[in-house]
């Protein structure tokens, strides 16, 4: 089984330093399942390729006690393991290129941190789930993927295609990150492991997946397949990865009283999920989250590759700092961090940076504005920023009767300046449509009460034409 990694960065032979393997030498490593040869078929200043050839000892493998479950008598000897990239390759990567994978390079520490052009070729990869699945795994990590599906037997084309692919991946990234991606993902395609999956697999997965796995849109599938034989450990891993960004700084990011108040029904999650789904439906690719707070909506948007440009704006610098930490913007690989930007700004002042977005979201923001200032926000958003779609959510005051702890006339959060009933919200939505040339639909979010509606109300505005009446100049 052959894996190659090439770079065409000027001074390409530096790849040898990054991989800790000299380009002029053939090196052979003894592993429990066979041998791994490392050599460089090409090594010039303009292109350098490292090849890793696994020579799996299928006889030893067949005798291995761990391989008892076979479909037929000779299955231990006649199988694809020696020829395909599988968990054997991951083991070889960690044993032979372990220092490179952890980003260590004493002689060239800066180079180890540099994103360089890299091309990976995996000779034969068994893929359960086909080309779509392959792309879903690698494209969110910034790879350009090209594949060739291999025939079942070249001599008998009418037998059809196999589930084996020849794969080429191109990216600009650090060598360490590419090795970590390969280490985790190669066995995921195949869904088999050659060794007993022990509990320390969880630590390995979290370690190698650091900085990318928690934000991968297919995180759960990856974890489930990687830890296939240990569903309870997989659940633990998914929970840990999902919470990684939520709990990393509890002392600073105090649980918001409003969220705590509504916690019983996990309303805020439902709200953010609904807004995300609504944004997906619009087909928007450039989205601005106005009053983004600690970045909870942004986090959801980052996971979806429909969104090419994602901007969060907030008036509070402190909140933006927390958002930056929670989203780990400093640690994201460049292809991810380039999609996301946080901006300090106010919704009450016209700002050219808010323009030219397909969609804007204002999730639980308007009720934080003093009513006399609401009209400034309206002009800033609906006249000047002028996104094709605007999604606004706000509490439904009718529903407050459902919370016995909330005295009548009180708001759900001390910082709320108003909370509208469904009728009041509809009047406001209609007036926006009239004045600024939008059409709107209002929908309930959260558990629906027959009489009182849902705890949150959401309006989706779509730009349809010119405003009907002018309402004076913006600030
Ligand atoms: N949309 C986020 C945060 C909601 S809390 C979420 O759903 O999690 C309201 C947010 O609006 C706060 O972060 C607050 O700082 C921000 N905000 C209040 N007034 C603002 C203004 N004039 N301009 C921009 N953001 C504002």
Image: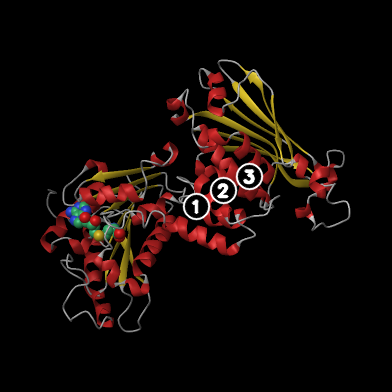
* Cα gap from disc 3 to disc 1, whole angstroms: 17 Å
User: Circle 3 sits in a helix, a strand or a loop, which is it?
Assistant: helix
Q: Is residue 443 visible?
A: no
- Residue 267 or residue 430, whichever sits in front: 267
x and y, in percent, of residue 188 in the image = 63, 50
Q: Is mark 3 within 8 Å of ligand 1?
A: no
Which numbered dot is residue 217?
1
The answer to whether the residues at label 2 and label 1 have Cβ atoms under 8 Å apart is yes
Point 49% across, 34% down: residue? 103
Which numbered dot is residue 186?
3
- Residue 82 or residue 100, whichever sits in front: 100
* Cα gap from disc 2 to disc 3, whole angstroms: 13 Å
User: Circle 1 sits in a helix, a strand or a loop, which is it?
Assistant: loop
Tell me if residue 28 comes above or below residue 208 in the rendering.
above
Q: Count neighbours of disc 3 (C-alpha within 10 A) and say few if under 14, some if 14 to 19, many if 20 or more.
A: many
- Residue 272 or residue 282, whichever sits in front: 272
Classify residue 171 as left or right of residue 52: left
Q: Answer with mark 2 or mark 3, whichever residue precedes in sequence.
A: 2
Q: Answer with mark 2 or mark 1, whichever residue precedes in sequence.
A: 2
> Which residue position holds label 2?
136
Q: Is residue 103 visible?
A: yes
Q: Quadrant of residue 294?
A: bottom left
Q: Count neighbours of disc 1 (C-alpha within 10 A) and say few if under 14, some if 14 to 19, many if 20 or more.
A: many
Classify residue 134 as left or right of residue 373: right
- Residue 341 or residue 81, whichever sits in front: 81
Furthest toward the right, the residue is 73
């Amino acid at each position: 089984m052959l894996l190659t990694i090439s770079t065409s960065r000027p001074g390409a032979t530096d790849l040898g330093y990054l991989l800790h393997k000299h380009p002029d030498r053939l090196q052979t490593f003894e592993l429990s399942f066979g041998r791994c040869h490392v050599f460089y078929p090409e090594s010039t200043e303009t292109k350098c390729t490292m090849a890793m050839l696994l020579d799996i000892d299928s006889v030893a493998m067949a005798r291995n006690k761990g391989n008892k479950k076979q479909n037929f008598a000779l299955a231990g000897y006649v199988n694809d393991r020696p020829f395909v990239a599988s968990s054997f390759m991951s083991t070889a990567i960690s044993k032979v290129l372990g220092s490179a994978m952890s980003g260590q390079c004493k002689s060239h520490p800066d180079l180890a941190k540099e994103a360089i052009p890299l091309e990976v070729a995996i000779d034969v990869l068994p893929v359960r789930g086909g080309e779509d699945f392959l792309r879903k795994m690698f494209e969110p990590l910034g790879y350009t993927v090209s594949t060739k599906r291999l025939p079942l037997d070249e001599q008998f084309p009418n037998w059809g295609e196999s589930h084996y692919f020849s794969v080429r991946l191109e990216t600009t990234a650090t060598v360490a990150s590419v090795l970590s991606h390969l280490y985790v993902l190669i066995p995921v395609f195949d869904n088999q492991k050659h060794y007993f999956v022990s509990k320390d697999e969880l630590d390995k997965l979290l370690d190698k997946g650091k900085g990318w796995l928690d934000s991968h849109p297919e995180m759960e599938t990856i974890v489930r397949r990687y830890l296939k034989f240990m569903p309870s450990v997989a659940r633990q891993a998914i929970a840990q990865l999902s919470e990684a960004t939520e709990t990393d700084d509890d002392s600073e990011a105090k649980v918001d009283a409003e969220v705590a108040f509504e916690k019983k029904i996990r309303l805020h999650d439902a709200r953010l999920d609904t807004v995300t789904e609504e944004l997906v439906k619009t087909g928007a690719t450039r989205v601005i989250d106005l009053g983004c707070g600690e970045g909870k909506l942004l986090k959801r948007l980052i996971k979806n590759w429909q969104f090419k440009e994602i901007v969060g704006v907030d008036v509070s610098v402190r909140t933006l700092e927390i958002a930056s930490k929670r989203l780990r913007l400093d640690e994201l690989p460049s292809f991810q961090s380039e999609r996301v930007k946080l901006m300090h700004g106010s919704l009450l002042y016209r700002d050219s940076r808010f323009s030219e977005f397909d969609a804007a979201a204002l999730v639980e923001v308007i009720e934080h504005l003093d009513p006399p200032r609401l009209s400034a926000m309206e002009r800033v958003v609906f006249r000047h920023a002028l996104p094709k779609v605007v999604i606004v959510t706000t509490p439904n005051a009718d529903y407050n009767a459902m919370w016995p702890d909330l005295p009548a006339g009180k708001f759900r959060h001390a910082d709320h300046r108003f909370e509208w009933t469904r009728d009041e919200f509809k009047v406001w939505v209609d007036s926006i449509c009239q004045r600024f040339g939008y059409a709107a639909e209002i929908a309930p979010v959260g558990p629906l009460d027959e009489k009182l509606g849902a705890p949150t109300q959401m309006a989706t505005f779509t730009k349809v034409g010119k405003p009907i009446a002018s309402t004076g100049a913006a600030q």
